[in-house]
Image (cartoon, rainbow, N blue to C red):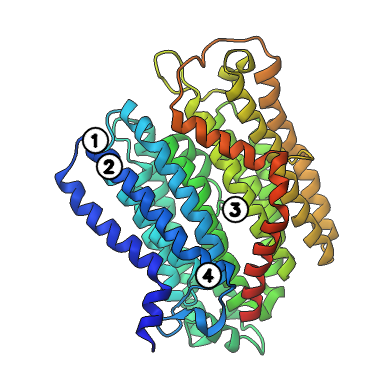
Amino acid sequence: MDWMQSLRLTAPEILLSVSGLILLVGSAWGQTRRDARAVNWLSVLVLIAASVITAPTLLNGVTGDAALAFDGLFSADAFAAFAKLLIYAAAAASLLLAPSFFERHGGYRPEFPVLVLFSVLGMGMMVSATNLLTLYVGLELNSLAAYVLAAFLKSDERSAEAGLKYFVLGALASGILLFGMSLTYGFTGTISFDGIAAATSAGLSKGALFGLTFMIAGLAFKISAVPFHMWTPDVYEGAPTPVTTLFASAPKVAALALTIRVAVEAFGNQTAAWQQIIGFAAVASIVVGALGAIWQTNLKRLLAYSSINNVGFMLVGLTAASPEGVSAMLVYLAIYVPMTIGGFVAVLMLRDAEGRQLEAISDLAGLSSTRPLLALGLGSVMFSMAGIPFFFGFWGKFVVFQAAVAAGLVPLAVIAAAGSVIGAFYYLKIVKVMYFDEPVGKATGQSDMVHEWLLAISALLISPLGWLLTKGLGVLAALAAGVLFAAA
């Protein structure tokens, strides 16, 4: 084993680990507001540095043996790099949102950015996993930090409830996943993805099929896919909004990338065994997410059901089981991240004159007359999520539907398109409330400059100007997907 190559390929993870430990020790001596902000900004710089280290891997299309570290336990290929860049961007945005929010709710502590760094470290291991052992270590490292983050706001009962629910259901999902992994190991005799693929090349035994099914069920919880979505609305509503922003973006990217790896690399020669399961989860998530959001009166819960709905659309690309389908899924993920961040930044900016957070949809009435720029930014997010033509969100849905049709899954594409029409109702409802309802004058609080810039950047990326990125994004997504299928 080439230790120097392994250390070089895992440089982003080493950076996150060492930085997290150093900042953790520093946090023990500094608990003031100034110290917490310093740790927060240092964590953002660490994520930027990790992105700089990771970007050449994607641009150079690194794959095969050149991407393997530690005897094949870890793969720093272009596919992992694509996912990591999205994860780092989402995590950095969440960190930028955190200080002003927590300082209004009882003080900000430096442990928060440290937990985010360790969570991101786990996500990086997830997307680079080529072995069941690496998969589980990365997933649990991410999950353990996430449980604490969900309950981080100790003065809020909803936050404590969200943390407890997430912990209990997350532990159940981890048990299901671990049971599936043990069955897979028992019936294939190996824990490496390549070994599993070789062992199942002649056919899938009933035991291995049960293992695959349980593994998909465990991963479905992590991506909030129906029927394992029940935790999402409660946790998203109860967790502190910067934490919800993180949950809805970075871990979603990591879990979806991991699901792709398991399906394509470990069970890529048994597509028929998982295609129907993923297809059902896609349709169910689209329908349940769309119908569940219609009745919501809380904006964070609506965005939670929107997240479930969007996962369904992305799983349509995986159901296609082709390089084009996975590429479309990655394109959708890249568009989904700024849409989600923009939506939750807008929620953070909805405050009354006394600084209290506003989450009810009715509080948005007439927002266009009192906060026109905020209404414009949130309106852009809603139009893009609805898939209205000329907004960038439309392109994400279009490429996913195109991949499904190319794979002969026309009924699935038709159902998904119908679900998109249903989902447009509640997105456009938000726009209607902001622009056509009588103003209530509640959202009059001042916004932080960081929030304003993040919303502006997100709104520009998902606006019609985002179409300028179409070609470059498509090339990078195709490169990442092609690397994965070449390995399979």
Q: Quadrant of residue 199?
A: bottom right
Query: Mark 3 belongs to which amino acid?
Result: Ala
Vertical placement of residue 74 versus 257, above or below? below
| Residue on which disc 1 sits | 34
Counting other residues with Cα less than 10 Å from the Cα at mark 1, is it few (<14), some (14-19), or many (20 or more)? Answer: few
Determine the CA span between mark 1 and mark 3: 40 Å
Q: Are the residues at dot 4 and dot 3 in contact (C-beta closer than 8 Å)?
A: no
Determine the CA span between mark 2 and mark 4: 30 Å
| Residue on which disc 4 sits | 57
As drawn, the label of residue 38 is: 2
Query: Mark 2 belongs to which amino acid?
Result: Ala
Residue 157: percent from the left, percent from the top?
A: 34, 31
In the figure, is residue 185 to the left or right of 113? right
Q: Are the residues at dot 1 and dot 3 in contact (C-beta closer than 8 Å)?
A: no
Counting other residues with Cα less than 10 Å from the Cα at mark 3, is it few (<14), some (14-19), or many (20 or more)? Answer: many
Determine the CA span between mark 4 and mark 3: 30 Å
Secondary structure, mark 1, is helix
In the rendered image, which quarter contains the C terminus? bottom right
Camera-near label (1 vs 3) is 1
| Residue on which disc 3 sits | 225
Q: Are the residues at dot 2 and dot 3 in contact (C-beta closer than 8 Å)?
A: no
Query: Mark 1 belongs to which amino acid?
Result: Arg
Residue 174: percent from the left, percent from the top?
A: 43, 62
Q: Are the residues at dot 2 and dot 4 in contact (C-beta closer than 8 Å)?
A: no
Residue 372: percent from the left, percent from the top?
A: 61, 19
